[in-house]
Amino acid sequence: MRSDPVQITEEMVFKLSRKRSPSEVDLRSFEWAIVTQLNGEKSVKQIGDTLALEPRETIAMFKRLFDEGLLELVHIPESDPFIPSELFAEIEYEFTYFVGPIAAILLEDQLAEFKRNRENLDRRQFPLLIELLSLEITNAEKKHEFQKRMLKKIKGLF
């Protein structure tokens, strides 16, 4: 059993540990069901939803499985999954250089396509946003330059 406390959240992703077999532990039926769902890609919430469990129950069972040494953490969610809203001023400034004063409208239109705004665009959507914005730049050299500048911003986020 583990002695280090860990706070399980619904966004975490686990896989089955190679260090200990589930057959070494007396598991309840829903705990076995969780074990069968572990693939290193599904979050705690996704597995709980699949099994129609309450969030509190799901977290408690994951905690027990983790404490028993049956789980390995694959992914801890970022504390802030969204792009900082200040970054949009920089994007708009750079984009304006390449497409002119229509940049702000194109940016807002693209965010609307994502059903997002400057406050809630997920970091993982940022590269796609840049790619779609770059399609608005007709000159190939300018498009490449915009993408190059934005790549620096992307690297800063990840």
Image (spheres, grey):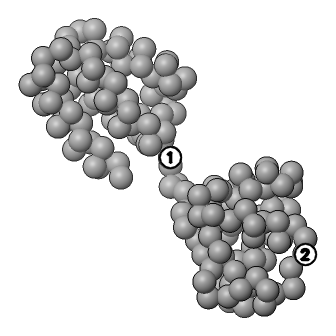
What residue does disc 2 label? 28
| Total tally of numbered discs in the picture | 2
- Type of amino acid at the residue the image marks with label 2: Arg
- Type of amino acid at the residue the image marks with label 1: Pro
Residue at 64% x, 85% y is 4
Indicate which disc, 1 or 2, sits on the residue closer to the N terminus: 2
* Residue 141: percent from left, percent from top: 9, 25
* Residue 21: percent from left, percent from top: 71, 86
Say which quarter of the image contains residue 2: bottom right
What residue does disc 1 label? 81
Viewer-nearest residue: 152 or 15: 15
The mark closer to the camera, 1 or 2, is 2
Compared across the picture, whether 142 is left or right of 85 comes to: left
Viewer-nearest residue: 105 or 1: 1
Viewer-nearest residue: 1 or 21: 21
Report the Cα–Cα distance between label 1 and label 2: 34 Å
- Secondary structure under tag 2 reads loop
Residue 33's disc number: none
* Residue 6: percent from left, percent from top: 65, 75
Say which quarter of the image contains residue 51: bottom right
